[in-house]
Amino acid sequence: MGEMGFFGANLEGYGCAGMSNVEYGLVTQELERGDSGLRSFVSVQSALVMYPIYTFGTEEQKNTWLPALAAGKKLGCFGLTEPGFGSNPGGMTTTARKSGDEYILNGEKMWITSGSIADIAIIWAKVPSDDPADENKVRGFLVETDRPGFSAKDVHGKWSLRASVTSGLVLQDVHIPATNLLPGTGGLKSPLMCLNQARYGISWGAIGAAMSCYDTALQYAKTRKQFHNQPIAGHQLIQEKLVWMATEISKAQLLSLQVGRLKDAGKVGHQHISMAKRNNVWMALEIARMARDVLGANGITEDYPIMRHMMNLESVKTYEGTHDIHALILGQHLTGIAAY
Ligand code: FAD
C-alpha cells in the first residue's frame, strides 16, 4: 500500500501522493469494500499518525517520520482512548510531566489500532503546569515504541475487525526528549482535528462495505431460485430491498462526495463530517443486515462476506465518535445547546 501511495494520500510532499480529498475518499471506499480492518489500518496511519505530524510537527519531525510512514517502512498508532475515557477523552488521566529537557509519560491507553505493531505512537496526554492557563492542557507526543516503560498487549477474542490489530498500551515512566512534543498541539481540539480527518475517510469506507454486501445480495438473488423455479430477484419484495440498498448507497456517495469537495475547497465544517460518518455507517449496517436476509441461511456463513462486514461495521459505528455522539455533535450544531 505504501508503494501505491495510500498512506497519507491526501497530504502534500514528504513522499505523500498529494491526492485530493475526494480521491483519498475513493481509495478508502475501495479498501473497505475488501475489509474494514484494512481501511482502519490505512486511516490510522494516514489520518491519525501522519496528519498530526504534518499539521502539528516541526520540520525535523516531518522529515524524520513522514517519508518512512508514507512508504510503509514505519507504522504508527494513535493513543487517545483510555480504559475509563472513550466518548469523553477530555477526562484522560495520562500525564506528560516536564523534567529538564525531557517529558516523562505515565498512563494507560485502550483499544489502540496497530498498537503492538507500531514503531511510533502518537500519545495524547495532559501536561501538569504551574501556570493556571496551561494546567493539564492536552498535548500530543511522539513516543517511539521501543522506549523503556512502553508496552502493548493485544486485545483477543474480538468478533469484529479481526483483520486489524487492537491493543492496550501502558506507559510507565516513559522518558522522551522534549523535542518529541508536537509543538502545534494544544488542547483537545488537536486530537479532534485528527479524528475529523479519519471520520471523513470512514464515511467513504463504510460505503465500500455496503457495496460489497449489495453486490453479493444482487448476484445471489439472480441465481437463487424459489417458488415456480423463479430467481428470487424476480420477487417484488427482494427487488424492493435491492432498490433500497442501491438508493442508500448512491445517497451516501453523494453526501461524502459533497463533504470531500467542501474539504478540498477548505470549507468543510466538523458537522458535515459528523453527518456523513453517522449516516453512512448506519446505512452500511442496515444494508449488511438486509443483504444477509436476501441470502437466507447461506448469508450466515463465511462463504460470503456479509456477516464479516456486518460485524466489522459494529466497531466502525463505535469508534471515531459513536453514532449517538455524532447525533449530539449535530444536535449542538443545530440548537446551540450541548447535550453531552
Ligand atoms: P463509551 O464512551 O463508554 O460509550 C458507551 C455508550 O454510551 C455508547 O453507546 C455511547 O454513544 C454512549 N454515550 C457515551 N456518552 C454519552 C452521552 N453523553 N450521551 C448519550 N450517550 C452517551 N481509540 C483510539 O484512541 N485509538 C484507536 O486507534 C482506536 N481504535 C479502535 C479500534 C476498535 C476496534 C475499537 C472498537 C475502538 C477503537 N478506539 C480507538 C476507541 C474508540 O474510539 C472508543 O471505543 C469510542 O470513542 C467509544 O468509547 P467507549 O468504547 O469507551 O464507549
Image (cartoon, rainbow, N blue to C red):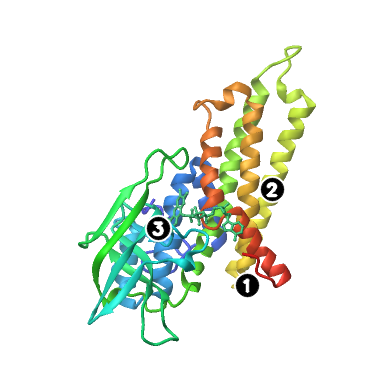
Image position of 128 (left or right of 256): left
Q: Please name whichever residue, 150 or 8, is drawn nearer the observer in this view of the structure.
A: 150
Given contact means CB atoms under 8 Å apart, are the residues at marks 3 and 1 in contact?
no
The residue pinned by badge 1 equals 267
* Residue occupied by mark 2: 250
Which residue is depicted at the point 56% across and 26% down? Answer: 300
How many C-alpha atoms fall within 10 Å of the one at disc 2: few (<14), some, or many (≥20)? few
* Dot 2 amino acid type: Ser
- N-terminal-most mark, 3 or 2: 3
On screen, 245 above or below 252?
above
Q: Is residue 266 left or right of residue 336?
A: left
Amino acid under disc 1: Lys
Query: Residue 121's spot in the image, x, y percent?
Result: 33, 62
Residue 288 position by quadrant: top right
Any mark on residue 308, and which? none
State the quadrant of the C terminus: bottom right
Q: In terms of sequence position, does the residue under pointer 2 or pointer 1 come before the other?
A: 2
SS state under label 1: loop
Instruction: State the separation of the CA atoms marked 2 and 1.
Output: 23 Å
The percent coordinates of residue 292 (x first, y second) are 62, 30
Q: Residue furthest top?
A: 228
Query: Circle 3 sits on which residue?
Result: 45
Alpha carbon separation for disc pair 3 and 1: 24 Å
User: Does the beta carbon at disc 2 come under 8 Å from ligand 1?
Assistant: no
Answer above or below: position of 108 versus 57: above
Rendered position, 17 above or below 211: below
Residue 7 x %, y %: 41, 57
User: Type of residue at label 3?
Assistant: Gln
Q: Position of residue 77 (x, y in %)?
A: 37, 58
The answer to whether mark 3 is within 8 Å of ligand 1 is: no
Mark 3: few/some/many CA within 10 Å (<14, 14-19, 20+): many
Mark 1 Cα-neighbour bin, 10 Å: few <14, some 14–19, many ≥20 = few
